[in-house]
């Protein structure tokens, strides 16, 4: 087999050898383990035609410069656009349509009462459109009730009634979207992706490399699995980084019928940080453990001037923006400030006695109602930081802070949610203080003290993503509580000192 002269690890050589057999492969690639290098080696080892499917456009562009000319590097959406989506060019990126106009076109002419709530036509049209989006991300052939998007604050029993009544409007919206020339419903990229998937496409390639396979929408999974008869499939990703299940993504690596391989040698950080990562991998029940690079000196301890601060939520990110602006630092936010601006404007509407069209807050009629919901309803506890932020600073101050954000290239510190940090890395990383420990459960220890509750798998995966973004030094910050939690210190495990941990280059 002809490979590049780059020195490969034993795991990378094993992957190349398995690829040469033509078998379908599933490769668990831990954080910083040279995944892209490995895939490049696979592609250059053969003259066969290949397709590399990337998570987003920037990754696809970067890969195009690294893969040989025999491999096409695309996103799923770009494949769908080339095949079918271009027919809908006239409807793509059209002007935003007021919700009441879309409602009229769908036949929603009057408010709908669901329990004690009155849901207005514009909101109903929005729910119908979000239902279509959920359907488009699924592998289902038709829209059903389980695709209906929930409304924040609506009890489950009331959601069932909403789903029953909204379904005809969602189906009407999907019918409207089939017309490539004109229609009342705003046409989005997920729409032509689904239309393409429903056409049962056959991809003209000998092998497919699916990157970030742990966060694949079922609609793409279906398309790729349908290529199994004529193309070699290589699913690559990290099941422990499956953090987008809340928006419909699926870990297609689990249960995939193929030769199982792994990449565990990290090229990003040293042994001490690998120990921290492995603690979260164990809690998440992940199939791999990482090995740190002895040549990389890594520290775990306090950071005074972080290059990046990683937060659990957008609201947590806003608090960090205030913190560093107050210190006179130039601050960037990964992904920009649109999400924060939208939430803040919605809060202003409620404070001013107006209803808001924001999908998270659309059912609330006043700021006081939202305050009560966030404080007293367990389902609304994640909104409490937003309430506290607005009540403490005011909406004008929040909007002013968002407007002061700079580009990452000009920033002294970058703020990011952990979700948006995936695929990124920085020298010094601090974990923000909105990663809360699980609540105590009803059990007691021998002294009568409440025992901490178990750590949710999804929380462990998000923490794993966050702690593995650092190259030189990690400040655990809001995750320090793991040092006292039994799940983070099982019997017989590594004893974790509370001071700084320093890995010395070997």
Image (spheres, rainbow, N blue to C red):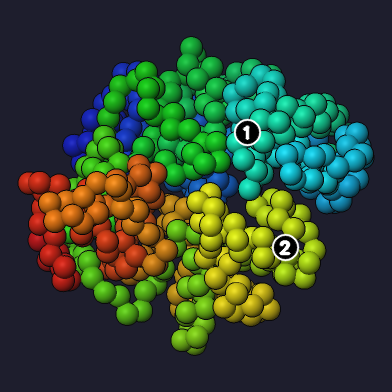
Front residue of this view, candidates 267 and 380: 380
Instruction: Answer with the quarter of the image where residue 235 lies.
Output: top left
Position above or below: 488 against 353 = above
Q: Which residue is mark 1?
A: 157
Tell me residue 366's x, y (percent).
72, 62
- Residue 58 seen in the figure: yes
Crowding near pointer 1: few (<14 within 10 Å), some, many (20+)? Answer: few
Tell me residue 409's x, y (percent).
52, 72
Q: Residue at x 23, y 30 (%)?
A: 14
Left or right? Give the position of 487 relative to 339: left
Tell me residue 281's x, y (percent).
27, 44
Tell me residue 363's x, y (percent).
71, 51
Q: Residue at x 48, y 12 (%)?
A: 229
Q: Residue furthest front?
A: 448
- Disc with the residue nearer the chain's start (1 vs 2): 1
Name the secondary structure under disc 1: helix
- Marks 1/2: CA–CA distance: 23 Å
Which of the numbered marks, if any, corresponds to residue 366?
2
Left or right? Give the position of 398 relative to 444: right
């Amino acid at each position: 087999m002809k490979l590049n002269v780059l020195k490969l690890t034993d795991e990378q050589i094993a992957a190349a050898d398995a690829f040469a057999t033509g078998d379908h492969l599933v490769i668990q690639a831990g954080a910083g383990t040279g995944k892209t290098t490995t895939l490049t080696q696979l592609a250059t080892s053969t003259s066969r035609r290949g397709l590399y499917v990337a998570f987003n456009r920037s990754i696809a562009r970067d890969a195009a410069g690294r893969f040989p000319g025999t491999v096409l590097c695309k996103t799923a959406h770009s494949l769908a656009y080339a095949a079918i989506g271009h027919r809908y060019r006239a409807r793509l990126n059209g002007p935003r349509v007021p919700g009441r106009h879309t409602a009229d076109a769908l036949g929603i002419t009057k408010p709908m009462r669901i329990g004690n709530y009155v849901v207005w036509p514009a909101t109903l049209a929005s729910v119908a459109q979000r239902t279509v989006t959920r359907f488009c991300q699924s592998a289902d052939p038709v829209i059903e009730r389980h695709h209906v998007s929930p409304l924040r604050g609506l009890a489950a029993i009331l959601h069932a009634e909403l789903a029953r009544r909204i379904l005809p409007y969602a189906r009407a919206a999907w019918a409207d979207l089939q017309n490539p020339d004109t229609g009342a419903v705003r046409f989005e990229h997920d729409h032509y992706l689904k239309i393409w998937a429903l056409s049962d496409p056959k991809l003209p390639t000998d092998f497919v490399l699916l990157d970030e396979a742990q966060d694949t929408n079922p609609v793409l999974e279906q398309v790729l699995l349908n290529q199994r008869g004529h193309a070699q499939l290589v699913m690559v990703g990290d099941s422990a980084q499956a953090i987008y299940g809340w928006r419909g993504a699926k870990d297609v690596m689990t249960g995939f019928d193929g030769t199982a391989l792994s990449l565990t040698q990290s090229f990003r950080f040293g042994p001490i940080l690998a120990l921290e990562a492995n603690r979260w991998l164990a809690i998440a029940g992940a199939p791999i453990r990482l090995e740190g690079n002895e040549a990389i000196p890594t520290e775990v301890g306090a950071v005074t001037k972080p290059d990046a601060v990683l937060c659990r939520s957008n609201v947590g990110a806003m608090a960090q923006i205030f913190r560093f602006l107050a210190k006179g630092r130039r601050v960037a936010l990964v992904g920009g400030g649109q999400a924060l601006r939208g939430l803040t404007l919605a809060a202003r509407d409620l404070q001013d006695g107006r209803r808001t069209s924001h999908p998270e807050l659309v059912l609330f009629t006043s700021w006081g109602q939202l305050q009560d919901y966030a404080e007293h309803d367990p389902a609304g506890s994640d909104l409490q930081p937003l309430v506290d932020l607005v009540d403490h600073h005011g909406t004008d101050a929040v909007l002013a802070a968002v407007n002061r954000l700079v580009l990452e290239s000009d920033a002294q510190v970058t703020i990011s949610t952990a979700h948006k940090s995936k695929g990124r890395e920085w020298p010094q990383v601090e974990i923000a203080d909105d990663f809360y420990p699980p609540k105590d459960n009803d059990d007691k220890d021998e002294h009568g003290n409440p025992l901490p509750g178990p750590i949710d798998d999804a929380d462990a995966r998000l923490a794993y993503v966050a702690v593995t973004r650092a190259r030189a030094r990690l400040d655990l910050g809001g995750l320090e509580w793991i040092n006292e939690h039994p799940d983070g210190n099982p019997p017989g495990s590594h004893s974790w000192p509370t001071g700084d941990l320093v890995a010395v280059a070997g």
